[in-house]
């Protein structure tokens, strides 16, 4: 898009599409999508975040308040608007956003009779690639932030993605929730997207002083082995303050423990991505 300076990108490169999914609310999906997106953008990659949650937390957290949301992911899914048209710049270099609005709440009813309803986002991303005339219009990564449920929006995101990132909070029901999500991913593979892979599980809001959290982390690592990222995101008040300033924590306070963790996670994610076996 505009004035991109960073890693080389070819017009024909297909962006890696990743969905941040967990049917539980408040586990750090949005926080991770924004801050990992910011950390990856800071390393010179061009990143687009698509906000697919009617609550619009990713949009607000990136400073794109309601009055700036002329177009949204609703227009893309329902009216076939091009992704590029709905995209806005954020205050972060190399980081772009398709905002969301409350209109998304009505999407199940609006698309009820559309046979293709699960593939609206996938089609939009494919069309965007066909439309990409200038090299600068392409992206290295597209991150999709999902609502906390397995509804049509999350299904669209899973159908459109290459890989799933699972933010997981180490609390009592974490493993149970993870099991449900893995079943859903399996089901999506069988029905909508047979090449979908799990990129990794990110442990969020980790509190070293909490015994239960330590035990759950141990269990998750035992169960999911190296799918769990080594880097964990600590509970850090700066991370929770940043959205009220409309900024990713990396911009709000680059030196706090939360920012450092997301920078480290970005390196680990990018490294892992090189070895990831994608079908395309
Ligand atoms: N590492 C962290 N430290 C402290 N607070 C956090 C951290 N990660 C997320 N939060 C806070 O927890 C709440 C839920 O996070 P959020 O990313 O919105 O979850 P989700 O998108 O899964 O619903 C938010 O208020 C957020 O600011
Ligand atoms: Mg969220």
Image (cartoon, rainbow, N blue to C red):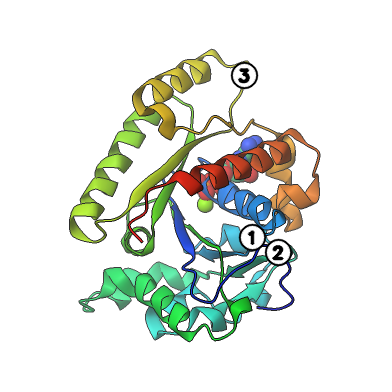
- Quarter of the rendered image showing ligand 1: top right
Against 217, is 39 above or below?
A: below
Q: CA distance from mark 1 to mark 2?
A: 6 Å
* Residue that label 1 marks: 45
Residue pointed to by mark 2: 6
The quarter in which the N terminus is drawn is bottom right
Of the residues under marks 1 and 3, which one precedes in the sequence?
A: 1
Q: Residue at x 23, y 61 (%)?
A: 192
Rendered location of residue 29, percent (x, y): 51, 47
Of labels 1 and 2, earlier in sequence is: 2
The residue drawn where x is 67% and y is 54% is 38
Residue occupied by mark 3: 208
Query: In the depicted view, which residue is nearer to us: 241 or 62?
Result: 62
Circle 3 crowding by C-alpha within 10 Å: few under 14, some 14–19, many from 20: few
145 with respect to 181 (left or right): right
Q: Observer-nearest residue: 80 or 230?
A: 230
């Amino acid at each position: 898009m505009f004035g991109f300076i960073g890693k080389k990108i070819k017009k024909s490169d297909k962006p890696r599409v990743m969905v941040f999914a967990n049917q539980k609310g408040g586990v750090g999906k949005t926080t991770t999508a924004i801050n990992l997106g910011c950390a990856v953008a800071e390393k010179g990659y061009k990143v687009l975040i698509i906000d697919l949650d009617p609550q619009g937390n990713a949009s607000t957290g990136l400073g794109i308040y309601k009055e700036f949301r002329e177009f949204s992911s609703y227009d893309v899914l329902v009216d076939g608007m091009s992704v590029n048209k709905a995209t806005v710049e954020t205050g972060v270099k190399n980081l772009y956003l398709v905002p969301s609005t409350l209109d998304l709440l009505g999407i199940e009813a609006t698309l009820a009779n559309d046979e293709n309803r699960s593939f609206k986002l996938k089609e939009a991303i494919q069309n965007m690639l066909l439309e990409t005339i200038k090299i600068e219009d392409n992206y290295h990564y597209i991150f999709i932030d999902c609502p906390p449920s397995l509804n049509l929006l999350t299904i669209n995101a899973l159908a459109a993605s290459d890989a799933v990132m699972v933010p997981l909070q180490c609390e009592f029901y974490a493993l149970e929730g993870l099991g449900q999500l893995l079943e859903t991913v399996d089901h999506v593979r069988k029905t909508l997207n047979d090449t979908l892979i799990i990129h990794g599980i990110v442990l969020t809001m980790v509190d070293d002083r909490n015994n239960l959290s330590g035990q759950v982390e141990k269990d998750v690592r035992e169960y999911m082995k190296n799918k769990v990222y080594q880097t964990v995101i600590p509970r850090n008040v700066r991370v929770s303050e940043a959205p009220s300033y409309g900024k990713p924590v990396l911009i709000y306070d680059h030196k706090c423990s939360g920012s450092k963790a997301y920078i480290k996670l970005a390196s680990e994610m990018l490294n892992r991505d090189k070895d990831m076996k994608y079908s395309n």
